[in-house]
Image (cartoon, helix red, strand yellow):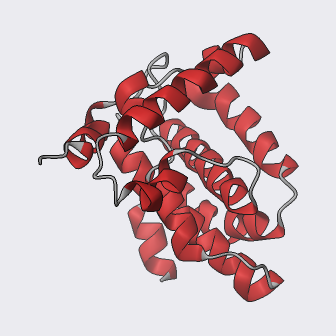
Amino acid sequence: MEHHFFAYISRMKFIQRWGLMRNTIPENDMEHALQTAMFAHAIAVIGVERYHRAYNPEHIMALALYHDGAEVITGDLPTPIKHHNPAIKLEYNKLEEIAADKLLSMLPNDLRPAYAPLIRHDETTDEWAIVKAADKICAYIKCLEERKAGNLEFEQARKATKKSIDRLGLPEVQDFMSEFVPGFSMTLDEISEEA
């Protein structure tokens, strides 16, 4: 029997992010998922090594790879709309659950238990908090990159996202922000000199 999960999830590359804003650098869900996974893994490793957290960095990385997977069915609903009021957010969450179930139904029965926690998120876990932190950091970096390219469209988003990251109160996130994020405001020559 044929299964279409990976053909479907691979369509993340067609889901454009930041649809309501003028972008100088287009971004799709697939490349965003990779960056989020890299950052989430690094934050988890920092948490384990420096703060003795009980994270599983590889599991967190896998969660991050699939964190927007349902968007191949729902599309990317812009954040200002998604969070405009609690009723919209609640209904969109229900839609994402339906989409997650649809994706899982595209897997063989014996693989569904392994993928279910990656596709249907338990947003109450410490692991999910790390994924969301990495997701916010990716948004912040997108804002930095757009500003560096002369696009001021993202300035308010940059300020709001930075405040949101600061409110997380996770030292591993702050370490990542202070140690790795400044390089995203630098030129290739500048980061090459410091290497």
The residue sitting at 48% across, 68% down in the picture is 190
Q: What percent of the width, then of the height, locates residue 61?
A: 51, 66
- The number of numbered badges drawn on the structure is 0
Residue 170 in the figure: left or right of residue 189: right
Considering only vertical position in the picture, is 21 above or below 56?
A: above
Considering only vertical position in the picture, is 56 above or below 88?
A: below
Please state which of residues 57 and 182 is positioned toward the viewer in this rendering.
57
Please state which of residues 76 and 141 is positioned toward the viewer in this rendering.
76
Q: Is any part of residue 152 visible from this angle?
A: no
Q: What percent of the width, then of the height, locates residue 18?
A: 47, 26
Q: Quadrant of residue 93?
A: top right
Please state which of residues 177 and 37 is positioned toward the viewer in this rendering.
37
Q: What percent of the width, then of the height, locates residue 19?
A: 44, 20
Q: What percent of the width, then of the height, locates residue 160?
A: 75, 33
Considering only vertical position in the picture, is 18 above or below 186?
A: above
The residue sitting at 12% across, 46% down in the picture is 2
